[in-house]
Image: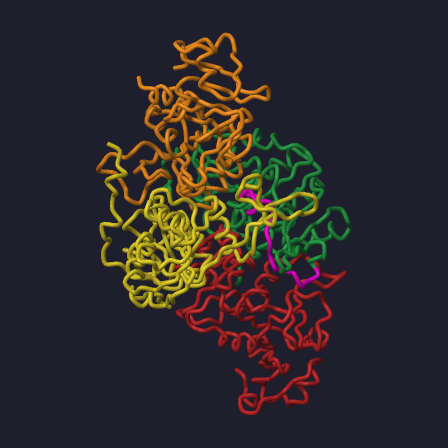
Chain colours: A yellow, B green, C red, D orange
Amino acid sequence: MKKNRTLENAIAAIPSGAVIMVGGFGNPGTPFSLISELVRQGQTDLTVIKNDANEAGHGISRLIEKRQVRKLITTHIGLNKLAIDRMNQGAIDVEFHPQGILAEKIRTAGAGSFGFLTDIGIDSEITRPEDLVDWKGTAYKVEMALSADFALIHAAQADWLGNLVYRGSAINFSPLMAMAANHVVVETPDLGAPGRFKPEHVHTPGAFVDSVVPLESLTSDYGILEHHVRR
Amino acid sequence: MKKNRTLENAIAAIPSGAVIMVGGFGNPGTPFSLISELVRQGQTDLTVIKNDANEAGHGISRLIEKRQVRKLITTHIGLNKLAIDRMNQGAIDVEFHPQGILAEKIRTAGAGSFGFLTDIGIDSEITRPEDLVDWKGTAYKVEMALSADFALIHAAQADWLGNLVYRGSAINFSPLMAMAANHVVVETPDLGAPGRFKPEHVHTPGAFVDSVVPLESLTSDYGILEHHVRR
Amino acid sequence: MSAVERLLSRAVKEISPGSIVNLGIGLPTQVMHYLPENFDVQIHSENGILGAWKQAEPALMDPFLIDAAGAYVSLREGASLFDSAVSFAMIRRARLDLTMIGAFEVDALGNLANWKIPGKFSPGIGGAMELAQKTKRIVVLTTHTDKHGNPKILKTCRLPLTAKACVSRIISDLAVIDVTPQGLVVREKLTDISNGDLQALTEAELTFETGEAAHEFV
Amino acid sequence: MSAVERLLSRAVKEISPGSIVNLGIGLPTQVMHYLPENFDVQIHSENGILGAWKQAEPALMDPFLIDAAGAYVSLREGASLFDSAVSFAMIRRARLDLTMIGAFEVDALGNLANWKIPGKFSPGIGGAMELAQKTKRIVVLTTHTDKHGNPKILKTCRLPLTAKACVSRIISDLAVIDVTPQGLVVREKLTDISNGDLQALTEAELTFETGEAAHEFV
């Protein structure tokens, strides 16, 4: 069953108020085309879950700039002064987690579990007494699973069944989010027929994917950021 | 740094009384050569963690037959009447878990976490009242992480750094066990120099692997089981 | 056509095009052989396969590729292979549309017992509990009675449960029965068995639909 | 050689052949450029790389391959790429031998504060907390004082901690200092700074080893 969708249709499925996971660590893996369409369609009151806030003018920062985002769940937004300003103004609610804890909370939802026991940050200010459970004589921090209504994912390659292959450092949160969201929308510049991948090379099996949007080309957003090149 | 070891040296690191994870679901992924050497060296009082007990005369069944195993943690041993008999005689202690729960307990240890919250089997006889936690108004079953002193893994291909590639249905528990054990021993019939794998195709990064044992050839254990061929 | 062949032929019709299906050990795995060669379905096997297919030709059998029942399966185009944690994530996240599963006992509430007979048979749980508890739709394939002629479709299961209230439909060699809030409803049955005879072979109370229920089910 | 160059040149010597190392954002990422081209080390980047290496040649830069600091890294032979859950599994399972990390404050007990200045700077925790808490060995790279000349090596950290008692060694532009159960011990220092002058720039009490301590550290 083909999962191909148009960019417009795939994003139109997202209502205002939705909780949306967005793949990517910095630029690699950020689904810029899906985000641009979400900016164009203008859904509001969104909760966005992404490792970072991209940089001002790019990716999910555009959603923040257009005031479409109510809450951001993230690990570090140090490269986006605009997002920090919005946070400090109280214009968006920002919830921070240690990076691997955010990954694991998402993966826990993706595994169909409800939470996990950890010691990360247990002695730090990120842990409140009510986050702790005493289990058979030992104190653990309980981190609850984090799921979402939608995940927006960029894949290097895909097939009609939704099998995905990532490349480079663009894997990051994407396979976890594809497992954790109820409706998974993927953009890819390279969509082909089933059978194109060695079965052992598939990063995200198609069972986790609902919609695949073929991109005709990649915009400059997907290119090298000159200010990150060391001279 | 080369992780190459001889079969004898790699297995000699295992003391009697050790807790050992063994990859494989049925035959595929079972490290028959590592197990044979463990049978030959004769360590005893072992706790073995494997999806199944292989079939009589093969794989970990040989460890059970030679009375090297004190306890087996597994999901299903229906294909090994000998192991069932030993269990019923009280000669080995067998602890059963639902298959995905066993996988997830191992993966939880592999992720450096201590346990997870689930609802699997929560209404069944496998759940005792003391397994339940009430967390913010909801009851969950707590499944604790399962780690091991050693993992014995079969990989289709490897490099000197310990990067592993599996094939077919022989992936199963192996990547999880490689993450969860303190010392990971891998056998492979195809060991080569770093650089042979596309970085996105590596199933288990070398960071998780301690010893790699090259096999000169695969014995008949690794072949087709005629009684599983449908005529 | 034997009773089992009849059951399996009917079971094939439960599979919707485009769906993801797990076939449990026993009768369900045999459904594979009744599927048309080009049927649009992805068979999930809990040992880490999506897109398993019928036994490979002898020359193509791969000792490193079996399904959860141990068969040397082939793979369809678009298949993927993955570890056991991902495989059960797929199950627990309800990404499977249908699991066909065997039963020792099934009851009027849709409770299923298929993993343990205390004192007689306890080889372990395997993947059954998670499949039964989490798949969107569970269809039980079972002979209507056991080898001694005793009913397997009960008022209340007596054996330890695999999962509570999980079964949507029962397909036996004699009838197709839905589990509904009003109890068990016979949707189809063999024409040469009377309602009374079918009820006599069934411990749970059956309701007989008119219409479809009168039809031969194969 | 500038103070920073001196610090980075010394930091390189902390890396043992064959080890797995994470280089935190700031001074540590710059250590990469001081590594000999064929040095046997695997650089871990928490966004999913084992085997990252120096910035790729312009023609080979890949916009889909950055390290956690945003640099367009190359990959060494034997590199692997993986998701963020696996990347932090590697960290939490203590499969990293060494993390070099920056600091706002570090103290005599090895406590580290490097992620938040309440009311001034709170961009998030990133990967620092897990790296600091779980890596086998943490070496802090920091200028000895802040830009106002205030000590960064304190009796007790005043900022929110990244992790408690995690630091093994501090390398500043002036000295190499070990965190020991007996407090901070200066192992190496610049020859042209006296013990008294170094102590004056350090809030925590320093013990001065004889021998090595007298030597220029680069």
Q: Residue at x 78, y 50 (%)?
A: B89
Q: Residue furthest bottom?
A: C210
Quick check: is B110 in the magenta stretch?
Answer: yes
Quick check: is D146 in the magenta stretch?
Answer: no
Residue C4: percent from the left, percent from the top? 58, 75
Residue A164: percent from the left, percent from the top? 37, 55
Q: Is residue A105 above or below residue D90?
A: below
Occupied quadrant, residue B185: top right
Q: Nearer the viewer, residue D202 or B208?
A: D202
- Residue span colored magenta: B107-125
Q: Nearer the viewer, residue C177 or A185?
A: A185
Q: Residue at x 48, y 19 (%)?
A: D177
Q: Is residue D36 left or right of residue C168?
A: left
Residue A109: percent from the left, percent from the top? 51, 56
Q: In which quadrant is the N terminus of chain C drawn?
A: bottom right
Q: Is residue B26 above or below residue D185?
A: below
Residue A26: percent from the left, percent from the top? 34, 45
Q: Is residue C26 left or right of residue D121?
A: right
Is any part of residue C14 visible from this angle? yes
Q: Nearer the viewer, residue C55 or C94?
A: C94
Q: Nearer the viewer, residue C49 or B230?
A: C49
Q: Residue at x 60, y 70 (%)?
A: C166
Q: How many marks?
A: 0
Q: Is residue A193 above or below residue B87?
A: below
Occupied quadrant, residue C16: bottom left
Occupied quadrant, residue C158: bottom right
Is any part of residue B79 visible from this angle? no
